Amino acid sequence: MAFAARIEPHNAEPIALRGVPANDTARPDFSRLEWSVIRLAKVDSLSTLREPGRLGRFINWLLNRKGNPELANERLESLRRMAVLGWHYGFTVPGEDVASFLSAGFSPDQYELMVHSIRAAVSGPQGITA
């Protein structure tokens, strides 16, 4: 439950931003598919980020639920996981989750764009536009 871990300032470590060019001046954006993953993550609960336990498997069996919310593409799954955390917590996401998002090939600017768009959708009637 990394998303529920306390953030302690005395043991904080800097996050290394690997794979992000220093002179990247292009405007950050997502593809239409990536925007749809972000929008669809709104209905995913935090329990979709971890494997179900014994009770969860029993309830799924009892209710005949067979779906798996994980996406087959690792990059899109990383985006979905970060979008779920963004819908629930905004910018207060643990550093290791942000680091795994960045290591999937996304940039810090894309992270900020996603969370700002999610916060705008939560606070305003216009929603996310792609």
Image: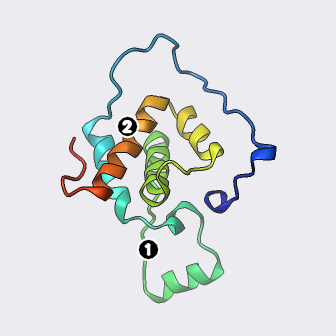
Q: Which x, y percent locates residue 97?
A: 59, 46
Of residue 123 and residue 77, the one placed in the foreground of this image is 123
Is the C-beta separation of discs 2 and 1 under 8 Å?
Answer: no
Q: Secondary structure at mark 2?
A: helix
On the rendered image, what quadrant is the N terminus found in? Answer: bottom right
Number of residues whose C-alpha sits closer than 10 Å to that of mark 2, classed few (under 14), some (14–19) or many (20 or more)? some
The picture quadrant where one finds residue 31 is top left
Q: Residue at x 75, y 46 (%)?
A: 9
Which residue bears the numbered disc 2?
113
Q: Residue at x 35, y 50 (%)?
A: 118
Label 2 vs label 1, nearer the camera: 2
Whether residue 37 appears in this view of the structure is: no
Of residue 88 and residue 81, the one placed in the foreground of this image is 88
Three-letter amino acid code at the position of disc 2 = Leu
Compared with 25, 45 (above or below) is below
Q: Residue at x 61, y 84 (%)?
A: 55
Q: Which x, y percent locates residue 86?
A: 45, 52
Q: Residue at x 56, y 21 (%)?
A: 19
Number of residues whose C-alpha sits closer than 10 Å to that of mark 1, classed few (under 14), some (14–19) or many (20 or more)? few
The colour scheme applied to this rendered structure is rainbow
Would residue 7 appear left or right of 51 to someone viewing this image? right
| Mark drawn on residue 66 | 1
The residue at the far left in this view is 126
Would residue 91 appear left or right of 42 to someone viewing this image? right
Q: Which x, y percent locates residue 27?
A: 33, 22
Q: Which x, y percent locates residue 41?
A: 38, 57
Q: Secondary structure at mark 1?
A: loop
